[in-house]
Image (tube, grey):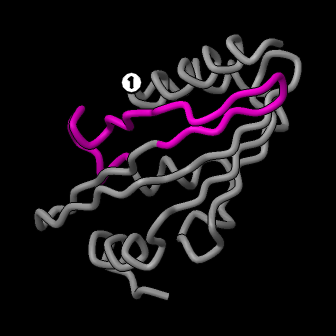
Amino acid sequence: MSAKENVDLMLGIFTAIERRDFERMLGLCHADVEFLWPPSLPYGEGGRGAWAQTWIPLQPTEAERRMDPRIVAATEDEVVVLWRQRGVSWAGDRFDGPVVGLYQVRAGKLARAQMFYFDTAALVSFLARATGTTAA
């Protein structure tokens, strides 16, 4: 696929995530897609559904679900996207931090996604407060 087609694919995936259309999102992914998160995060080793289980309760409105994806680079095989991870706890604490994702595309579908948070320590702290767990 062309770099432009890969950009369109990734923007479609981000739109599906923001709209909570996980069926559509998974339809744009290979059946064996890999999602790689920093291991210090509660969903770092948890597989596909762990990110959603963590973030859906922390993103009750469109404002928190908005990811504002910005394409940094794209080739026939990869797309790099800068996006925002947002959330709000029941107590009103907020998180809004940048993430860079490296996405590998194969045969028109997402094959691998690896996320790099700019401040993983702040995110771990927010998640511990928001979910009532102990920070690592």
Residue at label 1? 19
Q: Secondary structure at mark 1?
A: loop
Residue displayed at 45% across by 42% down: 83
As for residue 70 lying within the magenta part, the answer is yes
Count of marks overlaid on the render = 1
The image quarter containing residue 67 is top left
Residues 36 and 68: in front is 68
Q: Quadrant of the N terminus?
A: top right
As for residue 57 lying within the magenta part, the answer is yes
The image quarter containing residue 124 is bottom left
Reply above or below: 15 against 51: above
Measured as percent of width and height from the top left, residue 117 is found at 51, 62
Q: Residue furthest right?
A: 107
On screen, residue 70 versus residue 32, left or right, reads left
How packed mark 1 is, by other alpha carbons closer than 10 Å (few <14, some 14-19, many 20 or more), is: some
On screen, residue 81 versus residue 98, left or right, reads right
On screen, residue 76 versus residue 70, left or right, reads right
Measured as percent of width and height from the top left, residue 126 is found at 31, 72
The image quarter containing residue 105 is top right
On screen, residue 44 versus residue 58, left or right, reads right
Reply above or below: 74 against 45: above
Measured as percent of width and height from the top left, residue 101 is found at 61, 46
Which region is colored magenta?
56-82
Reply above or below: 38 against 24: below
Residues 132 and 29: in front is 29
Measured as percent of width and height from the top left, residue 26 is found at 66, 26
